[in-house]
Amino acid sequence: MSHRAQTVAAPKALWRRAVGCGDLRPYKAGHLWDSSGPRGPEAELSRVSPRLWPLVILAVTVVAGGAGATVITTHLSRGNPDPGGRILAGLQTVESAIPAETDVMLRQANEPRWDSCDGQAGTFGWNNVTFDVQFRVREQPDTLVGQVDEVLTGAGWHRMEASGTPLGPNARWSRTLSGPIVATAVLSEGTRGDGSGTYWDIGAAAPPQGRQASGC
């Protein structure tokens, strides 16, 4: 088949000069064509002149660097909600109040996340720092509350007014961690509702440093 006949057979093909060659060959988007048939995009990369690779690498580096700079700039503009993890470390002191003979069911620590009320303008900010432990013990409720209160008081927490729930007592403490950051801790009894019995939960929370997310 003549060169003219090949042109007619591929009316939708785009013509380009093959790299390193002097002839014209039909080119379809995403593929290279030669005498052996079509090739994928990776074939096109393999045909790039070695002299062009430094420019390709430079372009990729510039794009990646720009994206990284955007992430860093965004983070710095929001500030650090818990510098050095000091707020979370202060909350974790409540775990020392749990009796030694304890069956720990759950331990969860959460640093602040950038949040909002369903993306509404003016509600963006950091949510609270939180720490929570769920456990089972053999002590009676009043005995456990007394033991926890003794340890937390020694660690700088202050007892607040307690309240009662259908399951048992609900004891509360507060502690100033740094500057205006005031944390609260709560010891309460709960149930999963699956017949596995009750458990105790001691949780602590504190606002972040900087802008705080507002609720809906």
Image: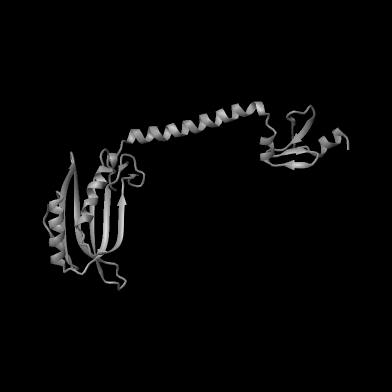
Residue 76 visible to an observer of this rendering: yes
Q: Residue farthest to the front?
A: 100
- Residue located at (27% from left, 52% from top): 131
Q: Pick out the residue farthest to the right.
A: 1
105 vs 66: above or below: below
The quadrant of the image that shows the N terminus is top right
Residue 90 in the image: state x and y as whole percent.
22, 47
* Front position in the image: 144 or 111: 144
Task: Indicate the position of residue 180 as horizontal and vertical percent values.
Answer: 18, 40
Image coords of residue 108 (percent x, y): 31, 55
Q: Quick check: 62 left or right of 127?
A: right
Q: Along the line of sight, which residue is nearer the eye, 4 or 49?
A: 49
**Which residue is found at the position 33% from the left and 36% from the top?**
78
Relative placement, left or right, of 83 versus 28 is left
Above or below, comparing residue 90 to residue 2 in the picture: below
Query: 175 or 128, which lies in front?
Result: 175
Residue displayed at 19% across by 48% down? 183
Q: Residue at x 12, y 59 (%)?
A: 162
Spot the residue most to the bottom: 195
Left or right, residue 73 beside residue 162: right
Q: Quadrant of residue 70?
A: top left
In the picture, measured across the screen, residue 175 lies left or right of residue 73, that is: left
Q: In this rendering, does residue 81 appear at all?
A: no
